[in-house]
Image: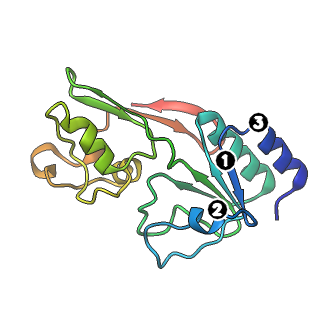
Amino acid sequence: MLDDAKFRTLHDGFAGELIGLDDERYESARRVWNGMVDRRPALIARCAGEDDVVAALRFARESGMPVAVRGGGHNVTGNAVCDAGVVIDLSGLKAIAVDPDRARATVQPGVLLGELDRATQVFGLATPTGNVSMTGVAGLTLGGGLGWIARKHGPACDNLMSARVVTADGTRVTAG
């Protein structure tokens, strides 16, 4: 159950979208690629940036609610959605910056493999990511990330240079 005062505090400073049980977007927003996963979060926080992530985490912590994080939404195991908790939805964060001189790409957590492939191929570059274009870059990379060119270039996790992370207590850090 959402505490009205806490929810108003979250809502007032939230730049993204907050989707509750009574929202017409709720049913589609709670779904992940694996159709066997059928969880019903109390709130889906579609974040517009790091400040929203921090705010959603604070709200969940103060409300005593579980948290799930959704990146690309492929999520075969269903960890990107929880029952009666807060889903921190990063799927709308899709910026990609490719530096062809350094052969590096910077991506936000909602980017899918196919989107990254299209952005890097413009420069004749390939990424050591997975095989399914609808998989999220963040989840695949943090989970290891085996793809077509992994034997030659290693898994995606071995090619990660750094990651901007918001920890469970809301601290922002750069790892790497």
- x%, y% of residue 157? 30, 45
Q: Give the residue at x 45% y 44%.
A: 109
Question: In x, y percent, where is residue 166?
Answer: 57, 38
Residue assigned mark 3: 13
Other-residue count near label 2 (Cα within 10 Å), few / some / many at <14 / 14–19 / ≥20: few
Which amino acid, by three-letter code, is at mark 2? Arg
Q: Residue at x 68, y 64 (%)?
A: 24
Q: Which residue is mark 1?
A: 17
Question: Tag 3: residue type?
Answer: Gly
* For residue 60, side relative to residue 150 (left or right): right
Q: Is residue 18 visible?
A: yes
Q: Residues within 10 Å of mark 1 (few under 14, many from 20)?
A: some
The tag on residue 25 is 2
Residue 47 lies, with reference to residue 44, above or below; the image says above
Label 3 and label 2: CA atoms lie apart by: 21 Å
Going from the N terminus, do you reach mark 1 or mark 2 first? 1
User: From the image, which quarter does the N terminus lie in?
Assistant: bottom right
| Residue type at numbered disc 1 | Glu
